[in-house]
Every structure is written in C-alpha cells, then in structure tokens.
Amino acid sequence: MLLLILFITTALIVISLIAVSNVLVFPRLRTSAPSVDAPFVSVMIPARNEAAVIGRTITHLLTQDYPNYEVILLDDNSDDGTAALARTAAENSDKLTIIDGQPLPAGWMGKNWACQQMQQVARGQFLIFTDADVIWERSAVGALSSAMQQTNADLYTIWPTQHTKTWAERLCVSLMAVVVVGYLPVIGTHYIPLSVFGAANGQCMAWRRGAYDAIGGHAAVSDNVLEDVTLARMVKGAGMRLRMADGNHLIRCRMYNDWQSVRNGYAKNILAGYGSVPALVIATIFHWLLFLFPWLWLAVGWATPGLPGYPLWPLLLIVLGLGIRALTAAFTHQRVRDALLMPVSVVLMTRIAFQAIWWHYTQGGPTWKGRIVRKQPTRNRTHG
C-alpha cells in the first residue's frame, strides 16, 4: 500500500510541476499588426452537416483585418444545407471558395480526404486547417500569421479557448487543459528533437507550404484518425520546427453541446490516442488512482500498519489533484470552480473509454456523423 501511495504522490507532484512550468512559459496568441509583406494565407474548413455553426464561422472568417487571405470550404456530402448557408453568410465575398467533396477513396479517413482536396486548390504560403465550429476573432488570422513569422515555425498549432455551457461540456471538454498544460511540457515540444514531444490540435494547424509538402501532407496520414498528433510527430522526427500556443480567446470553439455529443466526440478519438485497448484501460486506472483513490482513502480511513500521514496525506493528494485541475482551468479561461468536481469528470471519462472499447469490439470503430470511422482497406493500385 505504501508503494502505491508513493507512486500516486510522485505522479501528482510531477504533473503539478509540469503545469506550473507551462503556465509560466506557454505562449498565448497575441494580436499583432500585419507586416507590409504579409504572406498569403489559405484558411481551409472541412464541413459535413455543419448547418448549426457554419454561418457564424464564415462570417467571422470573412471579416478578418488581415489583408491577404482566402477561405476554402469543402462541403463533405452534407444533407443539411451547409454549403448554401455558407454562401448566404459570405454575401458574395470573393474570399470564399466552396468545393464539393469527392467520394471517399479506399484507404482514407473522411477529414483527411477533405483536407487533401482543399490543399490542392489552396494558393497560400501558409496553410491553415481549422474546423467548422472554430470561431476566429477579427485579428486572429493576422495574429497567427505573425506568430508563424516570428517563430519561423513549420507547423504552428493553436489550442482554442473552449467555450462550454452544459455540465457535460464543463466536466469533460475542459479536461483538455489538464492534458495539454499538465502532461505536455511545452519546452519539450518546442526544443527537444524527439517525436514523443510532438502534439497538435486539428482544430487549428497552420503550416508553411514547403513544410507541409515535404512531410507528405494529409496523404501521409490518410487512414489515421489521430492525424493531428501523427503529423506533429512527423514534423519533430524530420527536424522541423513545431510551435504551439493557447488561443487566448482570439481563436475559440464550442466542440459539443450535450452529453451525447461529448461522449461520442471523445470516444471517437480516445482509443486512437492511447493506441490500444490495454493502454486505454491502464490510463483509466491511472486516473482513478490519481483523482479518485485519495478521496476513497480519506473516506474509508484505512488503518494500514506502518503507514504514516493519515489524514493529512490523502488531503494533500486531494489538494494536488484539485489544484492541477484549477490551475489549468484558470490558464485556459475555464471555470475554476468546476475543479471541485474532478472526481465526477474522471467517472464520465471512464464511461467514454468504455464507449470507445464497445465500438471497437462491436463495429470495428467509432460512429461519427453517420459514418463508422475505421481504417478502410487500400485497393490494389495495380489491379484496381
């Protein structure tokens, strides 16, 4: 028992130190006046049945104060009028190009295929891939372009400020901050040339055109449901420059709007993120130990022979766990008081993990927007 408690204590201290160091050095996206020779930027949005959000997204993107950019929207066989709503929002702006998505080829995931088609018509020196539910404030494109120029980044990814309303969103979506700020040392991502430190967020990835082409673009991750992280690790492995920043309200997003969309959205990627069912189970147990076990220890008051420190030790572990959650929430503009419900968040994420495992064994992959997202067999190109 003592070894287990020492393990939990060490893990929480390490995560706390990473979180504190990231809060001190993690970049934030800042407004910046565009340079005279501002690079041409292509902002690309894959959209499938996004009628609820696409009008607002297009309106924001077409009112940027950046002088030199285009917006490309790919309508991925939507049946809810997504393209028509985008055209209405554009009000005949010549900055918007809408293309119809081609049928999904064998060996491709839907989003990756959409991005591949858009980049083929994009004219930008900088290529920005973003999602249909991401909102860009008026100076956001210029801020990101300036950040890329200042850092000479080959890939610059933004972690948008997450907008949450319902309890499911507040207790689950905000945990992204714990992962990014608490588990990923940004100094390692920026300066240590190891692929393990590679990470990116598909909600906003900005590329130098030459770097994107050199890495193989989305064709290199055609069948990968976790394409953003994989591309980031490829960038690190190739010795290119990866940078990231917090969206700082300039780029923000409301990913989901109820428990069902939260559950399905996270279950879509969580298994791919951990790589296997056993790894996901181990990670789930790890989070039980860190964020649930101290509460259970305090409540039960186990009288373990030779184990000092009760009740102060479990109280310390509880404070560390809640502190990590609160600190990362404050840094990313989330509700700090929701940290008090961290044990509930862990239980909900456990339910999401079980959903992912269930999909894996019953249908071969997660369900998302009417499709089962799974690796498709690649056709024999010789005998096609």
Image (cartoon, helix red, strand yellow):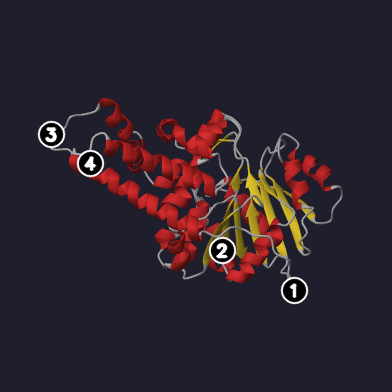
Decide which of tag 2 and tag 1 comes sooner along the chain. Answer: 1
Q: Secondary structure at mark 1?
A: loop
Q: Residue at x 49, y 49 (%)?
A: 226
As drawn, the residue found furthest toward the bottom would be: 37
Mark positioned earlier in the residue sequence (4 or 3): 4
Q: Identify the mark nearer the N-term, 2 or 4.
A: 4
How far apart, in angstroms, are the residues tagged by discs 3 and 2? Answer: 54 Å
| 141 vs 87, nearest the viewer | 141
Residue underneath mark 4? 4
The residue where tag 1 is placed is 37
From the image, tell me which residue sits under label 3. 305
Q: Are marks 4 and 3 in contact (CB under 8 Å)?
A: no
Element assignment for label 4: helix
Identity of the amino acid at label 2?
A: Leu
Q: Is residue 312 left or right of residue 116?
A: left
Between marks 2 and 4 in the image, the one whose residue lies nearer the viewer: 4
- Mark pair 4, 3: CA separation: 14 Å
Image coordinates of residue 360 in percent, x first then y, are 42, 36
Q: Quadrant of residue 40?
A: bottom right
Q: Are marks 3 and 1 in contact (CB under 8 Å)?
A: no
From the image, state whether disc 3 or disc 1 is nearer to you: 3
| Earlier-in-chain disc, 3 versus 2 | 2
* Circle 3 residues within 10 Å: few <14, some 14–19, many ≥20: few
Pick whichever of labels 3 and 1 is earlier in the sequence.
1
In the rendered image of this protein, does residue 192 appear above or below residue 44? Answer: below
Task: Please tell me the numbered disc located at residue 155.
Answer: 2
Secondary structure under the numbered disc 2 in the rendered image = strand
Q: Identify the image quadrant of residue 142.
A: bottom right
Q: Is residue 103 above or below residue 232?
A: above
Which type of secondary structure does the marked residue at label 3 adopt? loop
Q: Residue furthest right?
A: 92
